[in-house]
Image (tube, helix red, strand yellow):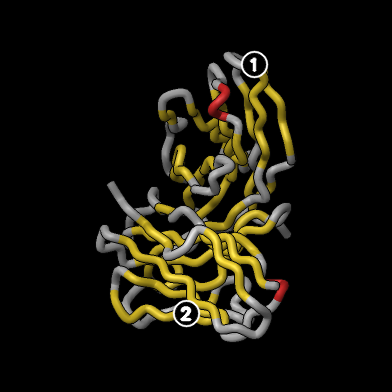
Amino acid sequence: AQKITQTQPGMFVQEKEAVTLDCTYDTSDQSYGLFWYKQPSSGEMIFLIYQGSYDEQNATEGRYSLNFQKARKSANLVISASQLGDSAMYFCAMREGYYGGSQGNLIFGKGTKLSVKP
Amino acid sequence: DVKVTQSSRYLVKRTGEKVFLECVQDMDHENMFWYRQDPGLGLRLIYFSYDVKMKEKGDIPEGYSVSREKKERFSLILESASTNQTSMYLCASGLAGRWNEQFFGPGTRLTVL
């Protein structure tokens, strides 16, 4: 079973509007972290936002916010006031527990391609 | 600023060649990772290392090996490159115990002919 599911392969949004990118996850761990990365056409993975499983408040970073609904196991990314430069692939990822006593790797979803229209 | 660098942005090799992909980070991170990215599949973990000379297999280690002789450097080795290893390879690093950070390099797009 997929651990991270991003159901939207592609999305369009009008410039200056808000957009929500969906992400659901599957884990039996109590401690985990959820990440969103942006990957523009240049290929570099750019960290956007992080939510820990014990964080009570939804994470926010500038125009990015994470709508964390623990009971539903969803961690949607909300981008407010979209800009043309937001056009990119967006990946949701999860880190579960600890592996070998050290920090575990990230498990990625398949990504959502966001296109911002002028 | 954390810097993760990869030796090449683009690489073209022939089937059967031995290929080395190098990754260097300058922030004294304990953990380093190699991922492979393919369209429609997202990123998949090949190998990771949480200390010098330590390595752990990820989800798709077959056909790959790694080397970590120094803390700052993590190498991915394709012993005998095959066409199905044509892909984007991304290196990442992070501090042990810092859950909310994992920094990526710019990626190496490898084509095996």
In the image, what residue occupies the spot 48% across and 52% down?
A: A32
Q: Position of residue B100 (x, y in %)?
A: 39, 48
Foreground mark, 2 or 1, reads 1
User: Label 2 vs label 1: CA separation?
Assistant: 45 Å
Residue A96 visible, this angle: no
Q: Residues within 10 Å of mark 1 (few under 14, many from 20)?
A: few
Residue A112's image quarter? top right
In the image, what residue occupies the spot 42% across and 81% down?
A: B67
Residue A58 drawn above or below residue B24: above
- The answer to whether B99 appears left or right of A69 in the picture is left
In the image, what residue occupies the spot 42% across and 70% down?
A: B22
Question: Which label sits on residue A118?
Answer: 1
Q: Residues within 10 Å of mark 2 (few under 14, many from 20)?
A: many
Task: State which chain disc 1 sits on.
Answer: A
- The answer to whether A51 appears left or right of B78 in the picture is left
Residue A56's image quarter? top left
Residue B26 visible, this angle: yes
Residue B37's image quarter? bottom right
Q: Which residue is mark 2?
A: B66
